[in-house]
Image (spheres, coloured by chain):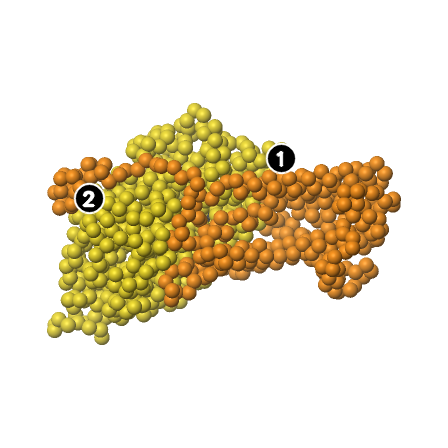
């Protein structure tokens, strides 16, 4: 049900864009009028979300420690997994963001009732797919800069060269395109086939996956089958990027389907799960040093609480304390 | 016939059949099955009153009507709104989960029970679904399709059941790519329930006791004198040494704070006897306190405010007695509080000095601000400097493994010190499998206030992963003791080991240390601190004893 709704939504959006691309008026709408607000929603929404997190204070330093603490000088500290200062935290966060270190720990637990045995196997599928997906997405984004920038920066050309290393097909197939699509299919398949993951999945999980898949497939089609006119597309995108939109004639309608899905992704991004991207940087279990006893952490909203002070305690027990030979404050 | 609160009620084959396939019905449509043995009795009104908590009332989990206050929905939603503003962790953990499922089979309750709502991600979704409905646009628009739902009385019941089926062990947070700590969500969830007067008695009664008596077990000051004196006699019987018990001693150098479980129940008491012996041997200028007689803090299992209310006594007492620094005993959640919270909630402790071992002169820089060190840090330093006369062969009949307690492992990272100490006092040490120790350690199944007999089914299920790892080293290496530096472990793991790995006994580390230490003026040691004959020691007539 949830996947069907998501699929229908993505399909519908694509069709809308595609049909829009058939007429001149539609091209204006989908090529110019929608991308701008989409970008505004994306940036504004993201800033709003990040600020909403940043505004909430971190009252306690609740690092999740994944290795030996810094204690006695002769005991080897796990400087990254249990950082005691900024350098360790920076490396820990970098590994988390760049290579998804926590996912790298993933295991699968399996219970064998007959043998009364619980076994743990490594389970790196999710990690591999997540890495493939996120990194190829980054490369694809960089590659797309060719369309927006004139002259094309050297980095972009370099990335393209490296990415097209296989040199098969005309135009060249990019490794990342394949990786990107394969990873999405894997993630979607996992979500559907793993009974536990399926059980917890929501529209917010299927929709972005399918949307990205739609974007990837339409892009792939545009490049390899429709062989769309890149010069025209570049004119349009450069125009958009420089705030002087122009609408060259004869851009393939499929392009508008592709662009509309991208616009939808931008609009959706700040509202759903995709905000995990900026969110990971703020996670207090990961981005704080475990130095609680060395450096005091201050809670900005700390307030006095009712306690049971010693004088009240002694008042209650004084006679008994005296009889038991315990020292008291008031004789 | 055994009852649901007795171990004998549960057949291993049955528990091992835990089905990990989710049910046909979606989780929002699957009602809670309140079966005896899987939930904990409500907090009694009298305890709530002692603490001045809202809506104290008598109710039963199986009642249809939990007698919530009139405007309970408003209370919960406002409580959520307030906490979303006060805790970045909470707000972020509500927003950033991608439901990747990496945490799913990391929770001992899910592994041993198979209930999908014990997957950390779904436990958090129980609360997140309400958050979506009332605080997010997508949730408002898409409703159930996007995992949003109305806050009903049944939701409250579900929260109660599952937030008290989480031991706040943080194992899930190790594996989550965003560091989402379901323990944090559980803590907030319990706070929200608390606003309606819903607590479990197994947590709120110790809290009420701790507030009034200074310890969870309601030991009054004169009771503590008796308890410790009793140990002094046993110590003398085992070693021939009569130790002193400094209590509420002004001007002592060190305030020693153990968990109160060590005062009264075996095997914790043997560790407490170990403390007394070791401090005597070292000639430590220290004191126990009857007022700050407990470092454990069930406030951690109740609310952030309660952490502060209960823990205030420790610095206050250190100040009143004029000590220089604080030494903490072997406890798990107590160390989460002492390490991660105390300095923030009760500090700054600028009236104390940076802890410095009077024996080795080592300055504990890592505790420079909080001024409290762990007894294993203290012992490891002593052993490293050769300040203890040890005969590990006295523990040769013991084949020991070490259980990392959740909080010291994942909220502090004290992993090597206990191992170093154990290896110095025992010749036969064996690690459990890699996936079950250190930061990946499994909970005993009874932490965070869940270690009560009425919760026996969940304790045994939650204890399965740990028990299974113990069984593994028992079969492979003949392990017969499990050391743990946590008072809750010393209570709950006894049950877990008896059930899943019978024959393995539970011990504190200081007990092992004291049993291996050659004390000045000791008599021939034929009995260990449990007053059991030490196997392999000649019971010969010349009175000298010795190893075979
Ligand atoms: S591992 Fe983290 S992101 Fe993944 S489902 Fe669990 S809590 Fe959510
Ligand atoms: S904190 Fe521990 S008990 Fe709670 S959900 Fe996570 S793994 Fe389970």
- Lateral position of residue A261 relative to residue B180, left or right: right
Instruction: Give the residue at the far right of this rendering.
Output: A249
**Which of the 4 quarters of the picture holds residue A1?**
top right
Which residue is found at the position 66% from the left and 45% from the top?
A: A208
Q: Colour in which chain A is shown?
A: orange
* Label number found at residue A23: none
Q: Nearer the viewer, residue A186 or A29?
A: A29
| Residue A214 % position (x, y) | 73, 47
- Numbered disc 2: secondary structure: helix
- Lateral position of residue B494 relative to residue B134, left or right: left
Instruction: Give the residue at the far bottom of this rendering.
Output: B548
Is any part of residue B37 visible from this angle?
Answer: no
Which residue is found at the position 73% from the left and 48% from the top?
A: A215
Q: Earlier in the sequence, mark 2 or mark 1?
A: 1
Q: Nearer the viewer, mark 2 or mark 1?
A: 2
Question: Mark 1 and mark 2 in contact (Cβ < 8 Å)?
Answer: no
Residue position marked by numbered label 1 in the rendering: B142
Q: In the picture shown, does residue B40 fall above or below B109?
A: above
Q: Chain of mark 1?
A: B
Q: Nearer the viewer, residue A115 or B539?
A: B539
| Residue A295 % position (x, y) | 40, 52
- Lateral position of residue B497 relative to residue A203, left or right: left
Residue position marked by numbered label 2 in the rendering: B221
| Chain ID for yellow | B
| Residue A231 % position (x, y) | 84, 51
Separation of residues labelled 2 and 1 (CA atoms): 59 Å
């Amino acid at each position: 049900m949830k996947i069907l709704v998501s699929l229908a939504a993505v399909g519908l959006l694509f069709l809308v864009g595609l049909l829009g691309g058939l007429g001149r008026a539609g091209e204006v709408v989908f090529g110019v009028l929608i991308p701008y607000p989409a970008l505004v929603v994306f940036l504004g929404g993201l800033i709003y979300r990040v600020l909403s997190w940043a505004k909430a204070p971190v009252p306690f330093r609740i690092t999740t420690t994944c290795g030996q603490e810094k204690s006695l000088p002769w005991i080897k500290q796990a400087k990254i997994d249990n950082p005691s200062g900024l350098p360790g935290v920076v490396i820990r966060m970098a590994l988390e963001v760049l290579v998804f270190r926590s996912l790298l720990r993933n295991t699968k637990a399996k219970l064998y009732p007959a043998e009364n045995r619980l076994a743990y196997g490594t389970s790196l599928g999710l990690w591999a797919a997540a890495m493939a997906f996120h990194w190829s997405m980054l490369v694809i984004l960089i590659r797309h800069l060719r369309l927006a920038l004139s002259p094309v920066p050297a980095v972009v050309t370099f990335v393209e060269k490296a990415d097209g290393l296989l040199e098969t097909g005309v135009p060249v197939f990019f490794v990342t395109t394949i990786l990107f699509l394969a990873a999405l299919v894997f993630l979607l398949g996992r979500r559907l086939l793993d009974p536990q993951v399926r059980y917890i999945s929501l529209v917010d999980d299927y929709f972005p996956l399918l949307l990205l898949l739609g974007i990837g497939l339409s892009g792939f089609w545009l490049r390899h089958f429709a062989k769309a006119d890149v010069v025209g597309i570049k004119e349009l995108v450069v125009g958009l990027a420089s705030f002087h939109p122009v609408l060259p004639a004869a851009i393939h309608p499929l392009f508008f389907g592709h662009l509309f899905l991208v616009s939808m992704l931008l609009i959706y991004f700040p509202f759903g799960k995709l905000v995990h991207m900026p969110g990971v940087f703020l996670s207090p279990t990961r981005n704080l040093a475990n130095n609680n006893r060395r450096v005091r952490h201050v809670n900005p909203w700390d307030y006095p609480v009712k306690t049971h002070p010693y004088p009240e305690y002694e008042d209650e027990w004084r006679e008994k304390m005296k009889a038991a030979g315990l020292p008291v404050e008031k004789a | 016939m055994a009852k649901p609160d007795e171990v004998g009620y549960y057949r291993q084959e049955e528990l091992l059949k835990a089905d990990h396939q989710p049910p046909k019905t979606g989780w929002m449509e699957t009602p809670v099955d309140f079966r005896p043995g899987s939930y904990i009795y409500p907090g009694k009104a009298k305890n709530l009153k002692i603490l001045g908590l809202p809506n104290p009332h008598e109710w039963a989990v199986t009642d249809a009507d939990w007698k919530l206050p009139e405007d309970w929905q408003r209370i919960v939603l406002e409580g959520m709104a307030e906490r979303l503003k006060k805790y970045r962790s909470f707000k972020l953990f509500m927003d950033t989960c991608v439901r990747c499922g990496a945490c799913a089979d990391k929770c001992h309750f899910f592994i041993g029970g198979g209930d999908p709502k014990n997957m950390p991600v779904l436990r958090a979704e129980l609360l997140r679904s309400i958050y979506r409905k009332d605080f997010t646009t997508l949730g408002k628009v898409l409703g159930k399709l996007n995992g949003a739902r109305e806050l009903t009385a049944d939701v409250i019941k579900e929260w109660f059941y599952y937030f008290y089926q989480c031991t706040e062990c943080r194992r899930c947070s190790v594996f989550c790519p965003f560091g989402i700590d379901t323990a944090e969500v559980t803590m907030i969830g319990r706070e929200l329930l608390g606003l309606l007067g819903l607590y479990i008695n197994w947590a709120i009664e110790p809290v009420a006791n701790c507030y009034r008596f200074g310890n969870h077990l309601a030991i009054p000051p004169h009771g503590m004198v008796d308890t410790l004196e009793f140990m002094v006699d046993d110590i003398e019987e085992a070693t021939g040494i009569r130790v002193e018990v400094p209590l509420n001693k002004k001007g002592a150098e060190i305030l020693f704070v153990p968990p109160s479980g060590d005062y009264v129940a075996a095997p914790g008491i043997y560790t407490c006897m170990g403390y007394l012996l070791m401090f005597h041997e070292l000639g430590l200028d220290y004191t126990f306190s009857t007022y700050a007689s407990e470092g454990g803090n069930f406030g951690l299992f109740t609310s952030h405010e309660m952490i502060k209310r209960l823990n205030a006594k420790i610095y206050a007492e250190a100040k009143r007695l004029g000590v220089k620094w604080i030494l903490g005993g072997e406890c798990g959640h107590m160390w989460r509080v002492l390490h991660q919270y105390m300095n923030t909630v009760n500090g700054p402790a600028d009236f104390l000095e940076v802890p410095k071992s009077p024996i080795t002169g080592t300055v504990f820089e890592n505790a420079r601000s909080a001024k409290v060190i762990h007894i294993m840090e203290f012992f490891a330093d002593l052993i490293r400097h050769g300040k203890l006369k040890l005969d590990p062969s006295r523990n040769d009949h013991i084949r020991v493994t070490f259980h990392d307690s959740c909080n010291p492992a994942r909220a502090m990272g004290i992993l090597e010190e206990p191992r170093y100490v154990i290896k110095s006092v025992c010749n036969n040490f064996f690690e459990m499998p890699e996936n079950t120790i250190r930061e990946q350690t499994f909970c005993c199944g009874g932490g965070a206030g869940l270690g009560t007999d009425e919760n026996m089914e969940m304790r045994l299920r939650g204890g399965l992963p740990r028990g299974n790892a113990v069984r593994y080293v028992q079969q492979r290496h003949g392990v017969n003791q499990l050391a743990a530096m946590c008072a809750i472990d010393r209570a709950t793991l006894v049950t877990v080991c008896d059930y899943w790995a019978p024959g393995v006994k539970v011990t504190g580390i200081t007990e092992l240390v004291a049993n291996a230490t050659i004390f000045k003026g000791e008599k021939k040691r034929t009995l260990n601190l449990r007053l059991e004959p030490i196997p392999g020691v000649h019971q010969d007539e010349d009175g000298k004893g010795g190893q075979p």
